[in-house]
Image (spheres, coloured by chain):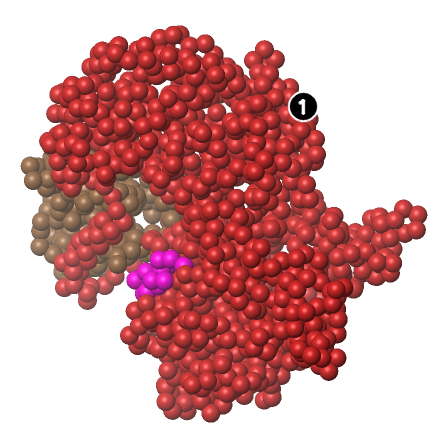
Chain colours: A brown, B red
Amino acid sequence: MADDKDVLRDVWFGRIPTCFTLNPDEVTEREAEPYYLLLPRVSYLPLVTDKVKKHFLKVMRTEDVEEMWFEHEGTPLKWHYPIGVLFDFHASNTVLPWSITVHFKNFPDVDLLHCPTNSMVEAHFMSSIKEADALKHKSQVVNDMQKKDHKQLWMGLQNDKFDQFWAMNRKLMEYPTEEGGFRYIPFRIYQTTNDRPFIQRLFRPVSTEGNPHTLFDLLKEMCPDALTKDGCLQHLLCLPWTSFMSLTLNLCFSSSPPPKVESASLLG
Amino acid sequence: MPVSLLWAVDVHGRVYSLSSAGQQWELGRDAPMEFKRVTAAQQCCWSLGCDSSIYLNVFASDLPVRYKVETYENQRWNPVDGFSERLLPSDRWQWSDVTGLQHQPLHSFQLPSSSWEWEGDWYVDENFEGEPTEKEGWTYSIDFPSTYTKDKKWNSCVRRRRWIRYRRYKAMDTWAKIPSQPMSLPDPFSDISCGGWEISEEPGGRLSLWVVSLQGKVWFREGICHHNPEGSSWEEVPLPGEVVQISCGPGDLVWAVLWEGKLIVREGITRDCPRGLSWAVVECPSPEVGAIHVSVGNGVVWAVTKDNKVWFRRGVNSHNPCGSGWISMVGEMIMISVGLHDQVWAIGCEDRAVYFRQGVTSSELSGKTWRAISAPRDGERPHSSASSQQSAGRFFSGEVQAQSVVSDADSDVEKGSADGAIFTTPEPSLGSPTEPPSNPAVDAPKARIPKVTSDSFISELVSDRDQGKPSKDVLSVTPAVLEEEVIPADGEEILLCAGEALLSTESRGGPQWSNVDLEEAQTGAVLDLAETCSLSSVTTFTLTVEDGAEEHPMWAWVSGEGCSVDSSSQLNWFSSSANTTSVTQSVQSMSLSISPAQTAAWRRQIFEQLSERSRREMDDFKHYEQAIEQSVWVKKGAMQWWRDWKPHKWIDVQFAFEQFSGPDGNKDGILFIYYNYNEEKKYLHAFINEVTILVPVLNDSKHTFAIYTDERTKQRWPIRVAAATELEMYDWLALLSVSCCESRGIQGPPSKQAIWSITCKGDIFVSEPSPALEAVPYPTPCDQMFWRQVGGHLRMVECNSAGIVWGIGYDHTAWVYTGGYGGGFFQGLASSTDNIYTQTDVKSVYIYENQRWNPVSGYTSRGLPTDRYMWSNASGLRECTKTGTRPPSPHWTWISDWAVDYSVSGSTDREGWQYAADFPASFHGYKTMKDFVRRRRWARKCKLTTTGPWQEIPPIPLIDVTVLPCGAQSSVDTFPLWAISSKGDVLCRLGVSAQTPAGSSWLHVGTDQPFKSISIGAAGQVWAIARDGSAFHRGSVSPQNPAGDCWYHIPSPAKQKLKQVSVGRTSICAVDENGNLWYRQGVTPSYPQGSSWDHVSNNVRKVSMGPLDQIWIIADKVQGSQSLSCGTVCHRLGVQPIEPKGQQWDYGIGGGWDHITVRGNAMEPPRIGLLSQKDTAPPTSSSPLPVGIAEPNGTAVYS
């Protein structure tokens, strides 16, 4: 009997095997070995690449080092997307391990935001949490939390502590039983075929007739193009991952069979 | 909350009930006729028939309503005949009551009504004051008004014996007419209301029933109680005017409406005088429009005025039954019914729908909004008005039909096929004469039509209807009937005629009828019926063509007095998935009906997809480095700590918990308490893997919990810490509990072998026994057992090794374990998603009012300076005032007001007082010359709502339960489960199996006196303790004969009254009221009653015998090295087949433990104790010897 907890654990402990290689244009003192890591899907690149940086700096002179950034097959990787999303978005059809090129020069200012410190990530992450809670509980839960609670959430993510994170995050996932769900389900739909960064609209967990909404309902409403004839989704990515959690939660209680989704995409 | 019923009568006089767990109105099919009004209690429903007689429907229960009648046979000795029937002329009757004053021969006993039957014949009682008598049951004495003994002596001149016979109420679940009295009442009844069950708990099931006659008189039914559900006689209540309607609340509120629209309130209703003393008049809410209806609850009064406005009365309570003022409420209603917990139902004036008042809580008694109950009515698809109208309409108008077929076919295959059949071949289902047998309405008498329409209430209902809105819904069926040219069966005819009646009165432009205008209404309705008969068909036809969609069931009366819901209840009455949404549902909608099984399947699917992804993405790359290294995680907080050294007090400390992954990947942790000692920083620590239990100790002043290790258990001195808020405390508890379980590798639900225990706070703990727990000679020490908490609140719990676990709450509700874990404060990860339900419990808080007598003013609340507080707890040591006493913890809320408690042991006088010579003394229930002090007990009920893996087993309240213990591998599939009801009846549960642990129904096992404890052994030996303290053994219990055949009386140990019994594999132990534990000697398969009681130990509160004959108890007092604990789990060491009584006690967790059951632990210990100890003992067990203060002899403790 699979429990919610098991699902949450599996989502949290999802890992992507990754091979980091240094961009050949970088000036090095000797040849840089590729670096292999298991990246947590729910984390962000700057949080998990300290080791990568350390590894490549060993072969480089400090004057040649600028801000580190990553690229996959020519596409710069946005650090403010969760890793799982980046992978599903850009590389779900490639062979594992995921090959990422590491750059220390020519930062693509057009494509990427600068990320000087991890506090940038924290700010971004907390704003996602707050945005999601605004949809879920009119921000009541997140506002009731103390500063240290916010810190615990963030530290849980940063240090990959499932229990620490979920001890706090469960409060964000609760709702009064009589209401039958959140006010709105926070979600974002990213599409490769679309120029817009993502689709994000208000979406109630329950239809006006009182039936629980499913992921299928959501997609039908938000991006009918993504639904091909057999109900199969081409490139669907749900993020940020906090939003995905609520979707997971919602999927679990909406209990209607999910549309056939490429699982890798669904579980971004 | 138990399932209970909301009752209603529709405009056709049919009675429906709606279960609080159900989704549709169930038709009361066996009603002998139409009813005008109903009034329900939780155990029965009274109704007023159209013949103006009163009917009673006692809900069937597995517990029969039995009444014991008894009479005494008296004899005197004379030298010629010996003992004979010939008595002296001065003697009592030969057959008499217990006093001898009443002549009572056997044939003088008659059944009170045709609803009763005799259970058996007369027999002689062979049990005298807990002792078995000689074969013929005689008891002897010197002369008649004297004391009797069971032994015949030389001076025994008279003797008597008691004859017993039971009668049983047989008219369960049917409407039985209350026979009218010989002196028939002057006029028929017109209103009825029952309530008053909270006035007194004695006798059980007591009800007040008030009725109003057509002439406006009020009558009170005397003597209704559990064993006399019909009551005995009618008593007229004098009135200041003519009453048209009356309402009686669950407590002491009774209000009535006078003919002229004023209201009267009954005053002086008490326990001794449930009829009350006098009436007080209350002005109606608006001076120009009088009241027409009133309904009262515990502390609320709702009224309806003649213009259908709704009013709420402010400030009503027992002390001020009249209240203080009216508040106008939103909504137009024709009647209102206030139910349990002051919840409110009403019938709307516009649409005649039943409305439920949402948001009624004890703090907001007037609620928030009206919400229409949209539950469909059951059965009678083509005939009844609610659910069938839709289908009938669909079928008969072509356009709608097309829609409905599509939506049905596409929305749900199963439903579609069933409904489709009806739609495509409609003729047989509607008009065919072969169908009627399946349709009870058809069997109803034809005479119903004029009766229904003549009912004053319906005329009134019709008369004030909005002219612009004819009742299309009711009429929608009629054109169909006409079109098809089918001669209507009775069911249709009723609808048709009712429709006509409605129409006809509408066309007259209906004047405002009130209840008293019955005669005029009657003639009017009947006349119009005849006049418009031919016309109506045309009219109705056009109406239906116009519109067939809108529909409302037509209700005339609703009664929520027996419906136990509150604002937190989950009700399925409002959005009916089947009926209202199916039409509007889009064809493409993927939404299907949802079942838990589907939820589970769905979750499993996600889980499998995730696992599949993990396999694909990670399996080949396990050797890769993790991006984030695991490190220590620390949680800190400010807490208070009850310091270890004297003087003990709370001091501020830093509390920190460090969690890290051990070398084997298991999580582990350390708790630190940083404190200052003489300005020096110090700390105390505890390893998480050594913590044996975390006990929440919530009271109204501090949010504390206790942390025990085995060492702390020996000391009887846990680490006590207090968090700043309740929330913080539960955060810590949840986190630490999960960590403790993780460090020990425990997860998921408790195993079938688990040992369950309960604290005096009602918290439930469970421990996984190690195989070495029962090893001989070196068992796992009891204080090393690890206990974890399970959500819920219980008073006792019993289990067996097949995983069947039953619990009983403080309010005697029975609960069955659902297989989940967590609940309560364990949320999110520490709790299972399924199998967690809401659980409630109710208990009473008691305080004592103490008074001392002085020669001037008699008894007053002025005590001596040395006296106890004038308001105190039972011991008198703590002051407890009415206003200052709070519920036991913030989780409990008051649900009643303070009331004098008469059910104190030792009886009371009429005001509840008990008298004594001085304060710390034994009290008695009457005043003597030597009594200078008196006290009485006040009780106030409070309620707890929590969650846990428990589901209620309604409806019989229990005080004890036991289930057959069995071996680890048992082939039994249904397990005998016995219980004692709160009234003392013995019950046997049928159909209890591992798949259905709740079983199916109760079988009542007759006894001659109430019982209080029961236990069944592995071989099906059933032992029980009666209220008089004697033991009984049930003979011939077997799988074929699960209830056995007779009770064998077993005398209790000399001068002791037994209170509890437990039977293991072969051993039987019992505890008496003085705390002695007794072992039954000489029990053999051929002589299962045994020969004598053998003393084992004193200082015992409760015993639990396991399937291996292991003996566990709750000890009264246990002294540790630091402190004393009361209520401690103890394990008997050295129990072996050759020494079944064991040798000594080993002490486990304690201080506040109330109950334990080891009946699930059928794990045979390893054969050779010494070797296995090395293998299986946990790493922390440093000493192989049993630790704890144990004495080799029988005495458990020094106190």
Residue positioned most to the right: B856
Image point 41% across, 61% down: which residue? B1003
Image point 63% across, 32% down: which residue? B236
A42 or B747, nearer to the observer: B747
Residue positioned most to the left: A229
Q: Is residue B403 visible?
A: yes
Q: Which residue is mark 1?
A: B240
Q: Is residue B997 covered in magenta?
A: yes
Q: Which residues are magenta?
A: B990-1002
Label 1 chain ID: B
Q: Is residue B1110 above or below residue B399?
A: below
- Give the amino acid type for the residue marked by disc 1 in the picture: Pro
Tell whether B69 sits left or right of B1084.
right
Image point 37% across, 65% down: which residue? B804
Instruction: Where is residue B312? Give x, y as percent.
Output: 56, 25
Image point 60% across, 59% down: which residue? B105
Q: Is residue B493 above or below residue A231?
A: above
Tell whether B424 sits left or right of B932.
left
Q: Residues within 10 Å of mark 1 (few under 14, many from 20)?
A: few
- The mark tally for this picture is 1
Residue B1154: quarter of image: bottom right
B216 or B573, nearer to the observer: B216
Give the dominant element type of the magenta stretch: helix, strand or loop: loop
B666 or B239, nearer to the observer: B239
Instruction: Where is residue B818? Give x, y as percent.
Output: 36, 58
